[in-house]
Structures are given as structure tokens and as C-alpha cells.
Image: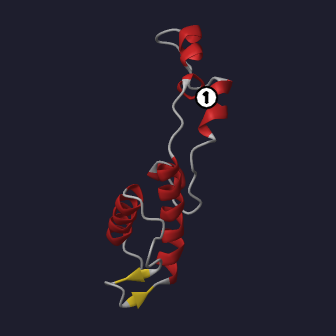
Amino acid sequence: MCDAQSGHEKTLTGLMAALAGANLIYGPGMIESGMTFDYGQIVMDNEFAKMIKFTVGGIPVNDATLSVDLIREVGPFKDYLAHKNTFEHMRIYPHPKIMDRRMRGTWE
């Protein structure tokens, strides 16, 4: 059975190693200190690896991704989240396939 705590710990361990320069993530699917292999865990580890790879690759920070001109154009206290530009730029971030980030009431 997949353990959410071990998934979180594996993500942090993999991220720290990757940020330090490692280019290999060892043990996808392994739980219980490598004594057990879990198919559900390997699916989750694949998602974690994708997020780690994205993070290590860097997050683009520039006038376009910060939407500096759009913020100036829209002005304070107005809705820039529904603007076309926001929807275009949100697609550059990873969207996990198996993790559901919706509110509990929505996915239930």
C-alpha cells in the first residue's frame, strides 16, 4: 500500500539531491527502506520525478512571466486572474496526472 508520508519524504529527498547536482533518482517504487516494491508507489514516484525535474530546470522569471505590463494595465483591486494572459502562462507549470488538487467537496 502506498504511504503518503513516504511519498512526501521521497520527494524532498529526491529534490534536495537534484538541487545539489545529482542526475539520477534511485529507488522508484521502493518502500520500507527498499525491502518492498509497490506498483502504486512507482506511479507516484514518476509524478514526483517530473516535478523535481521541472523545479531543477528553473522557473522562468521575466517581465512576460511576471505579467508586469498586464498588472499595470489592469490596475489594483481588479481581476487579472481571469485574463487571457494568465491562462496562457499557467500552462508552463507541471500538472500532475494522478494527484487531485481540487477541494474535497468538488472531487467527492
Please tell me how crowded label 1 is: few (under 14), some (14-19), or many (20+) other residues with Cα within 10 Å: some
Colouring rule applied to residues: secondary structure
Circle 1 is placed at which residue position?
A: 86
**Which residue shows up at 54% across the image and 27% down it?**
62
The image shows residue 96 at horizontal and vertical percentages of 56, 57
Q: Residue at x 52, y 8 (%)?
A: 75
Residue 24: % across, % down: 48, 70
Residue nearer the viewer, 15 or 88: 15
Exactly how many numbered labels are in the figure? 1
Give the image location of residue 30, x and y in percent.
42, 82
Residue situated in front as seen by the camera: 16 or 30:
16
Quarter of the image containing the N terminus?
bottom left
From what the image shows, is residue 2 above or below residue 101?
below
Q: Look at 35% across and 64% down and name the residue there.
A: 8
**Which residue occupies 50% across, 44% down?**
58
Residue furthest toward the bottom? 35
Q: Amino acid at mark 1?
A: Thr
In x, y percent, where is residue 105?
Answer: 47, 50
